[in-house]
Image (spheres, rainbow, N blue to C red):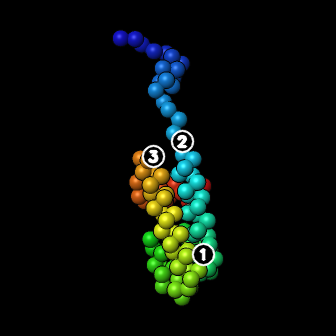
Amino acid sequence: MKIYTQKEWKNETAKYKKEINTTDFDNACQIFRQICSEIGELIEDENFKGGYDDMMTFYNHSSYKTSEGMQLAIAWSGANDLCKYEASKLGIGSPEWWYRCWEK
């Protein structure tokens, strides 16, 4: 059995580490945050983050029933699904993907 120095071990383990590409997840989060920002502007709630609790606020707002509100609701749903899909490819589940999305 080989006994490694710290430097040798670092070099050895570097061979097995692969870079995780989060570009698609980051892009999906950017879209999600943008849509949440647009919903927040529509309902005059600058803290709107698109969480499930936030969505009830939007659904109960009178602007939800407008064509702009419905378009944003559909866009939110699609962006939410896209984020979950991209997160799942990285092994990230719900609601962790949402927290990571808002870390940026």
Comes first in the chain, label 3 or label 1: 1
Residue placed under numbered mark 1 in the picture: 40
Viewer-proximal residue, 47 or 27?
Answer: 27
- Amino acid type for the residue under numbered disc 1: Gly
Residue placed under numbered mark 2 in the picture: 21
Residue placed under numbered mark 3 in the picture: 90
Q: Could you classify mark 1 by the number of other residues whose Cα lies within 10 Å: few (under 14), some (14-19), or many (20 or more)?
A: some
Q: Could you classify mark 2 by the number of other residues whose Cα lies within 10 Å: few (under 14), some (14-19), or many (20 or more)?
A: few
Residue 66 image offset from top left, x and y in percent = 56, 85
Viewer-proximal residue, 21 or 1?
Answer: 21
Q: Secondary structure at mark 3?
A: loop
- The residue that appears at 48% across and 85% down in the rendered structure is 60
Comes first in the chain, label 1 or label 2: 2
Comes first in the chain, label 2 or label 3: 2
Q: CA distance from mark 2 to mark 3?
A: 9 Å
As drawn, the residue found furthest toward the left would be 1
